[in-house]
């Protein structure tokens, strides 16, 4: 069965195969995006590049600051297919989960009590 499908494959079928695989990828990307656990506010991403196209106009620092003004202290962005939760605190911006700020390395009980609501929902 598979050998007959492969043997009947021709070069003229490549554009159709690329279009179908692109449609399947985009559909899967947005299905995962809209059904993700614990969704936070943030800008709408594009497949493959995520929100990287939005920082071109601003630069990273100004872009994160404009997102902070629009979405608040905690929001999510997607860069290169990776979901990042950005937290703004008194020291500035930090990706939630790195640099001792996240779930695994958090030693600040007050901060954790406040932010655990986002993870428990």
Image (cartoon, rainbow, N blue to C red):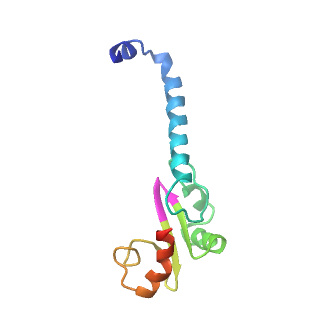
* Residue 75 drawn at (x, y percent): 56, 69
Q: Pick the residue in front: 69 or 63.
A: 69
Asked where in the image residue 108 lies, by quadrant, the reply is bottom left
**How far across and down, in percent of the image, does residue 6 sit?**
37, 17
User: Magenta span has 83?
Assistant: yes
Residue pictured at 51% horizontal, 58% vertical: 78
Horizontal side of residue 57 vs 105, given as left or right: right
Q: Where is residue 4 in the image (x, y as percent from the top left)?
A: 37, 12
Left or right of 37? Residue 97 is left
Q: Is residue 84 above or below residue 93?
A: above
Q: Nearer the viewer, residue 7 or 108?
A: 108
The correct choice, above or below, for 40 with respect to 16 in the image is: below
Between 67 and 107, the one lying in front of the other is 107
Q: Residue at x 47, y 59 (%)?
A: 83
Magenta region: which residues?
78-84
- Residue 49 in view: no
Task: Left or right? Give the position of 41 relative to 37.
Answer: right
The one of 71 and 93 positioned closer to us in this rendering: 71
Residue 9 image offset from top left, x and y in percent: 42, 16
Kindly tell me whether residue 105 is visible in this rendering. Answer: yes
């Amino acid at each position: 069965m598979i050998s007959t499908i492969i043997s009947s494959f021709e070069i003229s079928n490549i554009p159709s195969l690329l279009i179908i695989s692109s449609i399947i990828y985009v559909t899967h990307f947005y299905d995962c995006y809209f059904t993700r656990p614990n969704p936070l506010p943030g800008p709408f991403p594009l497949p493959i590049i995520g929100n990287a196209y939005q920082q071109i106009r601003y630069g990273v620092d100004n872009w994160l600051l404009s997102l902070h003004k629009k979405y608040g202290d905690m929001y999510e962005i997607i860069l290169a297919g990776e979901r990042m939760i950005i937290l703004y605190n008194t020291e500035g911006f930090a990706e939630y989960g790195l640099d001792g700020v996240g779930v695994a390395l958090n030693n600040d009980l007050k901060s954790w009590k406040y932010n655990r609501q986002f993870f428990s929902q």
